[in-house]
Amino acid sequence: MADTSGSDHAKHERAAGAPGPSRAGSAVRFLTGIGALFVLAGFAAWSVLSLHAPSPAGVDAPPASFSADRAMEHVEQSARVPHPTGSAANDEVRAHLIDRLTGLGLQPRVNSTLGVVVRGPDRVNAAAVDNIVAVIPGTDSTGRVFLAAHYDSAQFSPGAGDDSAGTATILEIARALQDAPPLRNDVVLLFTDAEESGTIGSEGFLASDPLAADGGVVLNFEARGASGPVVMFETSEGNAALARLYAATAPHPAATSAAVEVYRRLRNNTDFTNFLNSGDFTGMNSAFFDGAAVYHTPQDVPERLSRASLQAMGDNGLALTRALGSADLADFARPAPHDETYFTVLGSVAHYPGPWVWPLAGLSVVLTGAVAAIAWRTRRATALRLVAGTAAALVPLVIAPLAAYGVWRLLVLIRPGYGSVLDLWRPALLRIGIIVLAVAVFLAFLALTRRRIGTAAAGFGCLVWLTALGVVFAALAPGAAYLATLPALATGIAAAVALSVRMPWLRVTATLAGSLVAVLVLAPAIAMFFASLGMPMAAGPALFTVLLCFAAAPTLDLLFSMSAAESTTAGGRRYRLATAAVPMTAFASAAILLGVGTDVNDFDARHPEPAQLMYALDADTGSAHWLSENPPTDYTRRYLDAEAEAGDYLPFTRSGRESGPLEPGGGVRLLPLHPPESAGGTGPDGRAPGAGARCRLGCAGRPAGSARSPFTPPRAARCG
């Protein structure tokens, strides 16, 4: 925003005898821009790397500390095979947990109950569940701290990350607590059953166990991947006291109040959801999200689980447990009057009270108005150009997310297997490519507008949208307002200084300082959004990358070798070439990164392509079909040859994401099977199932005209 803009001002300079642009001056400006870019990139890398998990501690770590290697022994024992609720394998995991807790000198018990979760007027999840409960008694308890994780796995997944990592974390925390002086407050260790079946186990515990009656503070441990920083992504309402405790206590913080705002609006559920819905608990929910390609798949095995992430989860969990276990829980077990705004900055957590959100948003509005006044008064931009700059800045804000989405759709077209993944196996280069693409879109906007309306007007338009989004977030998602408001404040102050001084070095210093604030605020958030949303939703991180570019606009403008004012006196062709080279270089870099990233993300034996195949039997007609809601893969294409309506073959499905694996009209592919061969079965009384008995029969069939299918339903019967 510091550059003089517009042809009128250029004519004024020439009339006053101002010298024309020189190659030396252009070179200095360009080198200054390159240097500033390296500074911003360096701080961005530092911000992201500060989120990385620590080195895992070995089995010889001090007894009172957390050791990922010790915890990993429990993961390897629990995650050998899939162990959904009700299975024999889950019984073995439960026995293992009870044995370990007993070995720690505790007295575990099984909370066997019927869990019932009502999801709507026509959907109820219910199951007989077996939760495991143990208590480490406090010396003078003021309440209870609950450490919670579920020990069942998804149906086809060994569940190393989801959620053997959580149960192993609690076991290792319990061992460390037992090796240290006792805490003031009771610590309840809760291993829930049937979380994957609809958070049924935790609901059963809350409804039936006396320990749940008085509420408390719960720390829930989850995973939706195999690696990455452990993000504290969800809290109870009125989280101010807990957020401040986390900021002061967690040794490896990775948190943003923006994630809390997002998660409160999603329909995703974990056990933590039931604790919050009960109204008797406060707490925090933490998970790691990177490596989501393994989530709920047979690939979620111990060998793929990051010990560094396990160490971060354990270090944070142990520190928070000790802090809560030593505190007066009356300060934490009830909601505070307000939420806290918080975010990670270079390995620490910055935070301020939620009630500050509106005053800060209002201050950014006032500051934006002041910048407009200074730009107009100093003749850096006319009122019309300021309006034009505001309108033009909307273009990259829309185009960059659309470009990111378009890239993903193109990648799915090239590699259809991408269409059924939460994230790719090796997404790093593609993530960087999306970021560079968003920067390239912004640089193209800057190149097109800086000569026509001037850098000051273009930069002011960026500031307006930062400020406006800060106000929108303050109204709709207060915990996310800092993502726009703080960069707007920093950019506004820097712009006011740069427009008011004559010394070039002071202008550059002011704009660079404002840009650095934006980098420190936004870079960690972009990294966490990529990990939690995955490449299919890369449009989200692309949007926030544009916001970062908005805040850094005066600094990025230095990459153009001539200022906007100098361009009016320079040769037109030379200026156009120099200007076009900047965004074109960025677009070329993005294309290379995306191309190489796609090449390294080919599927192989180590990184298999996901495939889905379901067997649907209509016992009334004796017909059966193979079904899939995913596009055919090399494996499933042998059995899928047509499109169909799901409801025609799975009559109990209905529309909506929570209706089950298929939805009516969901594009289901099918191929008829030969009539199934009954495997037989008897009821509990030894009788063959007859009229009035409800049976689930195992069947075997083969695709018509093909060899016998490798998929054979279990030869078993359950009757009742």
Image (tube, helix red, strand yellow):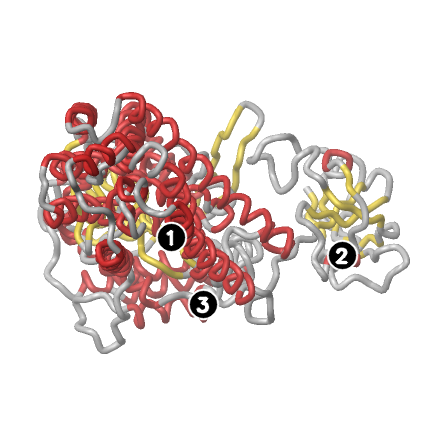
Circle 2 packing at 10 Å, graded few (<14), some (14-19), many (20+), is: few
For disc 2, the marked residue is: 637
What residue type is disc 3 on?
Arg
Quadrant of the frame with the C terminus: top right
What residue type is disc 1 on?
Ala
| Secondary structure of residue under mark 3 | helix
For disc 1, the marked residue is: 578
Circle 1 packing at 10 Å, graded few (<14), some (14-19), many (20+), is: some
Name which of mark 3 and mark 1 comes first in the sequence.
Answer: 3
Is residue 245 something one can see in this rendering? no
> Closest to the observer: 657 or 579?
579
Whole-number angstrom distance, CA of label 3 to CA of label 1: 48 Å
Q: How many marks?
A: 3
Q: Is residue 199 left or right of residue 503?
A: right
Is residue 665 something one can see in this rendering? yes
- Residue 428 at x, y percent in the picture: 43, 60
Q: Is residue 37 above or below residue 483?
A: below
Q: Residue at x 70, y 48 (%)?
A: 628
For disc 3, the marked residue is: 304
| Secondary structure of residue under mark 2 | helix
Q: Is residue 430 above or below residue 486?
A: below
What residue type is disc 2 on?
Arg
